[in-house]
Image (cartoon, helix red, strand yellow):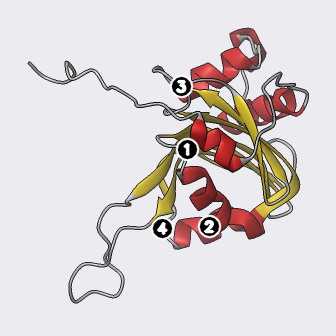
Amino acid sequence: MLLETYQAKGLLTVTLVNGQTSTPGVYAYRGDLVLKEGTLREGSTTDRRPPEALFIHSALIIEDDKIKFINGLLPTLNLLPVFVEKYKTDIAPDATAIVYVENIGKSLQVELEGVTYILLPFKDGLVWNEILEELYIEKSELKNQSAEDKVAIAYAAAKTYKSKAPLVSFAEAEDNTIVVVKDAAVGAI
């Protein structure tokens, strides 16, 4: 199974959800997905440093060993092709992809490897809460559902989601990136 393969390769981190939905053969994942592995520690063939890049707070639906739903946060737009290159053989041609990106100023759509990625700007908050709000999913719809089925509910809503954002080339999308200024007043005082 795809998620077990990713787990064995160390590609899943900070895992919140990883299991089968109530639909046999359909699996849900929520957590961070590794885009760039850390380098191997000196003298080791297996011990790695922390990942260099992550697809943060991702939510995936896997069906027939193909990724059918993609959601999460990319700190920078230039990580989208990294994600696509790393996972393209596992992404279904009809995948639904709604991705938050910190360094874009407006909603856009881009097509990479035959899949259209809806890109939404992200300021702050929890990615999971943002996607539920974007898809108009009420908390009552999620009540008494398993964690895996909550991801499946988001996927079902995402399949009918229509973005009004323009479909642009990746180069045009890069022209719409912004400089992200982080508030330095975080953490212990």
Residue 143, quarter of picture? top right
State which tag comes first along the sequence, 2 or 4: 4
Q: Nearer the viewer, residue 184 or 27?
A: 184
Q: Residue at x 87, y 45 (%)?
A: 23
Q: Residue at x 86, y 62 (%)?
A: 64
**Residue 170 screen position, x and y as percent:** 69, 48
Q: CA distance from mark 4 to mark 1?
A: 23 Å
Q: Amino acid at mark 4?
A: Gly
Q: State the count of labels.
A: 4
Q: Which residue is mark 4?
A: 10
SS label for mark 4: loop
Q: Amino acid at mark 3?
A: Phe
Q: Which residue is mark 3?
A: 122
**Residue 88 screen position, x and y as percent:** 73, 65
Q: CB atoms at circles 3 and 2 under 8 Å apart? A: no
Q: Amino acid at mark 1?
A: Leu
Closer to us: mark 4 or mark 1? Answer: 1
Q: Nearer the viewer, residue 47 or 119?
A: 119
Q: Which residue is mark 2?
A: 86
Would you call the spot at circle 3 few (<14 residues within 10 Å), some (14-19), or many (20 or more)?
many
Q: CA distance from mark 1 to mark 2?
A: 15 Å
Q: Residue at x 69, y 12 (%)?
A: 139
The disc label shown at residue 153, or none: none
Q: Residue at x 70, y 39 (%)?
A: 148
Q: Which residue is mark 1?
A: 77
Quarter of the image where the N terminus is located: bottom right
State which tag comes first along the sequence, 3 or 2: 2
